[in-house]
Amino acid sequence: AQTVTQSQPEMSVQEAETVTLSCTYDTSESNYYLFWYKQPPSRQMILVIRQEAYKQQNATENRFSVNFQKAAKSFSLKISDSQLGDTAMYFCAFMKHSGGYQKVTFGIGTKLQVIP
Amino acid sequence: DGGITQSPKYLFRKEGQNVTLSCEQNLNHDAMYWYRQDPGQGLRLIYYSQIVNDFQKGDIAEGYSVSREKKESFPLTVTSAQKNPTAFYLCASSIDLGAGYTFGSGTRLTVV
């Protein structure tokens, strides 16, 4: 079974600074997807960024980028130029890449507070 | 705009009562999911449906039931058999799991 670990329950960052949220996972699979979801105080989950394991290039979406280290099974999220709207819970998620339905495993989340 | 609508936003259930949470999507996604979120835990899968008239149990299906009579709709019933139903419930859909989920805004269920 796959597991996803987010070891930082809470973090804070000054507005305009950079912050990195960590995520590690355990799997014996070689082909899979990794995701970061954001859950702001409104509680609607939003997909921030995704990474396919077979792609060596780290995914980037505007101010959000990942550091994907496949051998280390690490998938950290870097938020640059932090904004007040980035205040949210952030969840890391893992899914095998295979046909049909595949279970998505979520971490327990990291609460990020952006300080003005 | 396309999206997922969950209603109601807040729901109160009395002991022994069944309640139904609504989830409607206009994204034309085949697959829909129900997750439960409790403090300090990740999301846990209750039920999923990959196609109309078909659905499968997730990790914590006991005390819940679903139906999928239309592509757009995937209601979740929390039955009296669910002993600890107080939680936040999220509905999601996907056109391709590799692309990730689109989530609704959730329903907060409280037992009174």
Image (cartoon, rainbow, N blue to C red):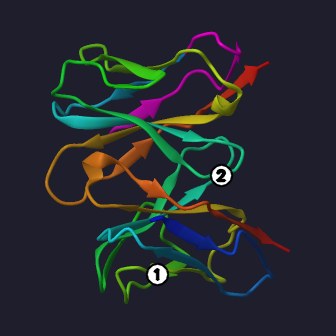
The reply to whether residue A23 is visible in this rendering is yes
Q: Position of residue A116 (x, y in %)?
A: 79, 18
Magenta highlight range = A1-19
Residue nearer the viewer, A68 or A6? A68
Q: Is residue A116 above or below residue B8?
A: above
Write down the quadrant of residue B27 in the picture. bottom left
Element carrying mark 2:
loop
Q: Amino acid at mark 2?
A: Asp
Quadrant into which the N terminus of chain A falls: top left
Total of numbered circles in the picture? 2
Q: Is residue A93 left or right of residue B41?
A: left
Helix, strand or loop at label 1? It is strand
The residue to which callout 2 is attached is B38
Q: Give the residue at x 24% y 43%.
A: A96
Marks 1 and 2 sit apart, C-alpha to C-alpha, by 20 Å
Residue B66 marker: 1
For the point 30% across and 13% down, which residue is it? A72
One can see residue A1 in this view: no
Q: Chain of mark 1?
A: B
Residue in view at x 65 percent, y 26 percent:
A9
Q: Label 1 is placed on what type of residue?
A: Val
Q: Mark 1 vs mark 2: which is more N-terminal? A: 2
Residue B21 in picture, x, y percent from top left: 61, 78
Q: Residue furthest right?
A: B112
